[in-house]
Amino acid sequence: MQSATVATGVIQLGCRRRRDWKEQCFKTLFLLSAIIGVLSLSVIAYFIFQESLPAFAEAGVAGIVTGEEWLPPALYGIAPMIVASLASTLGAVIIGVPVALLTAIFIAEVAPKWLANIIRPAVELLAGIPSVVYGFFGLIIIVPMIQQLFDIPAGNTVLAGTLVLAVMILPTVIAVAETSLRAVPKTYKEGSLALGASPMFTVFRLLLPAARSGIMTGVILGIARALGETMAIIMVMGNAPAMPGSILEPARTLTANIALEMSYASGVHASALYATGIVLLVFIMLLNGTLLYLNRGQAK
């Protein structure tokens, strides 16, 4: 009996050591993955910053960020591109986020299962469509529609870019918002309905606040998608490097500016395009910081 007990103890000890070894391997793997991610971001940021120094040295930070004229190799003001990027992104959020949020609510809480199983793959398919296809759709459908509707010489405007971006951010926001709504404990909904609340009251006054953190994540990801979009914007926005006076005028975004001119730029001109990338990176960092702040406030 004592021998059997000793043998059992040895076996358990061996199994525990094997589990500890596996646990340590996975912890090391996770740590290495995190280090690789941080190092990748650091290397990219350092490279872009290093390449942009000549432009900042010649034109100054204020001259680049607040300058309103882009005429290389003399003037490197990107304020018109900043305004165009922010305007098109803000418009896309105003149009796209309500549609995406209502769609997510419909799929998660309203639609019968068979209908949700049809709509969900269709939404996921939108995420897999290449940007150039969205741009082609905007160029063929949206641009002529705007031209005829507002009776303007050309429909390649900020409004066209806004509408295309609004469609492009839909799958990201819908997917994350739906997942967040489904992650809310069922007891929340059951308790609300048991107290006599209507299904729509429960959705808008209980489930949405409970899923706010995930929904905000989806919105931020959608904003980042809109802010970083290039090909579709190049095809529909007109690409004029001038300050847009309204949404019915052509404009050029930060990403479009880089894509259009990097192939032939050199010297300070190329450095100014890297400086444009620095501005984009700052915007993305501000978005992530905003998300962290909002989520932290909810946790408190």
Image: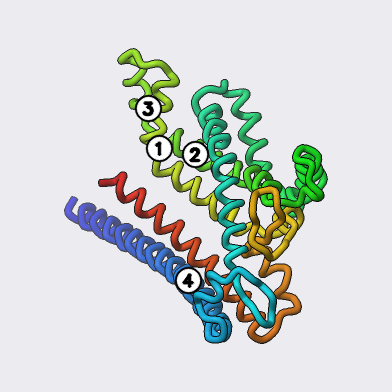
Identified by mark 4, the residue type is Ile
Kindly report which numbered mark, 4 or 1, lies closer to the viewer in this rendering.
1
The residue drawn where x is 79% and y is 41% is 151
Image-based side of 141 in relation to 66, left or right: right
On screen, residue 5 versus residue 174, left or right, reads: left
Mark 3 and mark 2: span between their CA atoms?
16 Å
- Amino acid carrying mark 3 in the image: Arg
Instruction: Determine which of the numbered discs, if any, sits on residue 211 in the image.
Output: 1
- First in sequence, mark 2 or 4: give its number: 4
Q: Quadrant of residue 25?
A: bottom left
Disc 3 target residue: 205
In the displayed image of the protein, which residue is found farthest to the left?
2
- Residue 287 position within the rendered picture, expressed as x and y whole percent measured from the top left: 46, 57
Disc on the earlier residue, 1 or 3: 3
Q: Give the CA separation, mark 2 to mark 1.
A: 8 Å
Q: Amino acid at mark 1?
A: Ala
Q: Secondary structure at mark 4?
A: helix
Q: Mark 2 or mark 3, which is nearer the start of the sequence?
A: 2
Crowd around label 4: few <14 · some 14–19 · many ≥20 (10 Å): few
- Residue at horizontal 36%, vertical 49%? 294
What is the C-alpha distance between the residues marked 2 and 4?
29 Å
Q: Label 2, on which residue?
A: 177
